[in-house]
Amino acid sequence: MQGKFPLTTRQTTILQSATTLAKNTLENEGSGHDWWHIYRVTRLSKKIAVAEGANLFICELAALLHDLIDEKLFDDPEAEKQRLQDWMLENEVTTDEAAHVMEIITTLSFKGGAGQPMTTLEGEVVQDADRLDAIGAIGIARTFVYSGKKGRPMYDPNVPVREEMTPEQYRDGKDTAINHFYEKLLKLQHLLNTDAGRKIAQQRHTYMEQFLRQFKQEWDGLDGEL
Ligand code: ADP
Ligand code: NI
């Protein structure tokens, strides 16, 4: 995939090193931000970047590094930010590129709906890719893994869906896997930035709706003609 922005040898080397860094750091991550999440977001970022004419190097580098300063994963995100900044400069990422990548990954996270809008096309691309990995078949699977890890039920008809939540409630409140679809996942298709992202989202969204319908039918024993 060459697109509008073919990669230089320097950039290719940086992307290889960033892949190794992300793999090594997130290898044992168990909350859905493991290396394979990064792999998928990077693949989608490249695909969307080409379709949207965005800078491929910035998109790919930001995708590879996007979870390395996350407040959920690291005790001291500020220290991680500094480490990443140093890493980029040591690895011959230019000051401008580093600033752009840092800007993207610090504004990217959804954070219970309070996320700021992205300021560049490359940011929009990577944010779309990250959000797309939370919907569709992968999104369903990640949701149940996350809920299981938190010790939450897959569903409880007595736990109401929350319309408004503080970031604390979003992270730690009483929740079920099924409620998470209504609280976040079904809203994501309307929060995408790019046409290419929206296109990919359509089928994933429909798939989740089908899943929820089937789940409810099975829950009440209403499925299957006898
Ligand atoms: P991000 O880091 O992309 O902002 P999160 O940490 O909120 O996303 O989510 C990571 C994964 O865990 C996503 O697939 C998301 O749907 C899932 N997840 C997050 N919060 C919940 C929750 N309360 N219940 C179930 N799954 C969740
Ligand atoms: Ni992510």
Image (cartoon, rainbow, N blue to C red):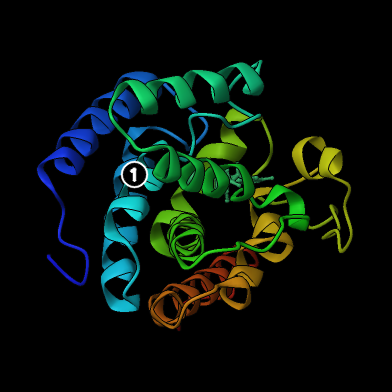
Q: Give the class, few, some or many, for how many residues have Cα within 10 Å of label 1's Cα (few <14, many ≥20).
A: many
| Mark 1: amino acid | Leu
Task: Residue 125: tell me if it is visible.
Answer: yes
| Residue at 36% over, 55% down | 59
Q: Quadrant of residue 27?
A: top left
Tell me if 179 is positioned left or right of 96 in this view: right
| Residue 140 % position (x, y) | 48, 56
Q: Tag 1's secondary structure?
A: helix
Of residue 124 and residue 91, the one placed in the foreground of this image is: 91
Quadrant of res 161: bottom right
Which quarter of the image is occupied by the N terminus? Answer: bottom left
Relative to residue 89, is residue 114 depicted above or below?
A: below
Q: Residue, x 38% and y 28% (percent of image)?
A: 88
Return the x and y of residue 76 as percentages of the image width and height: 66, 16
The image position of residue 19, as x and y in percent, is: 25, 33
Q: Is residue 51 above or below residue 17?
A: below
Q: Which sits in the foreground, 195 or 142?
A: 195
Quarter containing the C terminus: bottom left
Of 183 and 192, the residue lying toward us: 192
